[in-house]
């Protein structure tokens, strides 16, 4: 599929789904941009134990309790960075199927208005509203499922990296106290 054919297909798909599908498209794009931002943190968090080690080396003259407090401040900053955008991503993932449901209602309303105006005589006119209803439902679910799954994978990966680094840092502080 050429680049132009893809954009034509996308425009045709979105126009068949009505205005709600456009909103779903932007909700999905926003969620994926935020997820990409979270994914880019993974390499930084993979080096977290080195950052803790560096902080320990900078402050090796302090006693164990003071060192632990210094590390806790750094850990708090990392946890803040880690949790950034998570609630927005969750809200966008929850919003997508609700928008799909709104599109379903809109499409069915369109179908019933067509039936009121033209009767059941022309199935092509009925298919347009039904198509709008089904496309928006499908799009809402297709946005929500992968966003939820990827967001959970990224969140757990970040938590695991942070927890491993923190455990190593605490072991280092204990060794420092001895």
Image (tube, rainbow, N blue to C red):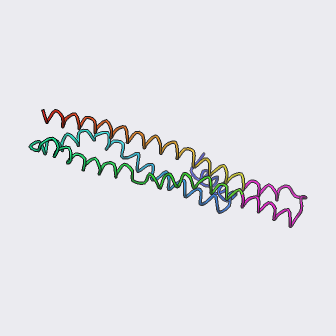
Nearest the viewer among 140 and 4 is 140
Q: Nearer the viewer, residue 68 or 138?
A: 68
Q: Is residue 78 above or below residue 153?
A: below
Residue 29 placement (x, y as % from top left): 52, 54
Q: Residue 149 at x, y = what percent?
A: 52, 42
Quadrant position of residue 161: top left
Which quarter of the image is occupied by the C terminus? top left
In the displayed structure, 148 sits above or below 170; it is: below
120 lies left or right of 148: right
Magenta residues (range) = 105-132
Our reading of the magenta stretch's main secondary structure is: helix
Residue at 37% from the left image edge and 41% from the top image edge: 159
Side (left or right) of 172 relative to 25: left
Q: Is residue 118 magenta?
A: yes
Q: In this figure, what is the number of numbered marks?
A: 0
Residue 160 placement: quadrant: top left
Residue 78: x and y in percent read: 31, 48
Q: Residue furthest front?
A: 65
- 127 is within the stretch colored magenta: yes
In the displayed structure, does residue 13 sit left or right of residue 111?
Answer: left
Q: Nearer the viewer, residue 126 or 112?
A: 112
Q: Residue at x 77, y 57 (%)?
A: 128
Q: Quadrant of the N terminus?
A: top right
Q: Quadrant of residue 21?
A: bottom right
Query: In the orientation shown, which residue stands out farthest toward the bottom?
Result: 117
């Amino acid at each position: 599929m050429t680049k132009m054919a893809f954009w034509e297909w996308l425009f045709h798909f979105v126009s068949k789904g009505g205005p709600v599908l456009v909103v779903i498209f932007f909700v999905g794009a926003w969620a994926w941009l935020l997820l990409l931002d979270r994914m880019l943190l993974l390499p930084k968090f993979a080096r977290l134990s080195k950052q803790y080690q560096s902080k320990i080396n900078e402050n090796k003259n302090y006693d164990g309790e003071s060192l632990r407090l210094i590390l806790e401040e750094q850990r708090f900053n990392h946890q803040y960075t880690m949790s950034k955008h998570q609630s927005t991503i969750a809200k966008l993932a929850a919003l997508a199927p609700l928008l799909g449901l709104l599109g379903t209602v809109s499409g069915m309303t369109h179908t019933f208005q067509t039936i009121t105006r033209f009767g059941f005589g022309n199935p092509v006119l009925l298919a347009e509203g039904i198509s709008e209803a089904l496309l928006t439902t499908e799009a809402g679910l297709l946005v929500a499922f992968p966003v939820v799954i990827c967001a959970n994978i990224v969140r757990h990966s970040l938590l695991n990296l942070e927890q491993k680094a923190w455990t190593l840092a605490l072991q280092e502080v204990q060794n420092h106290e001895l």
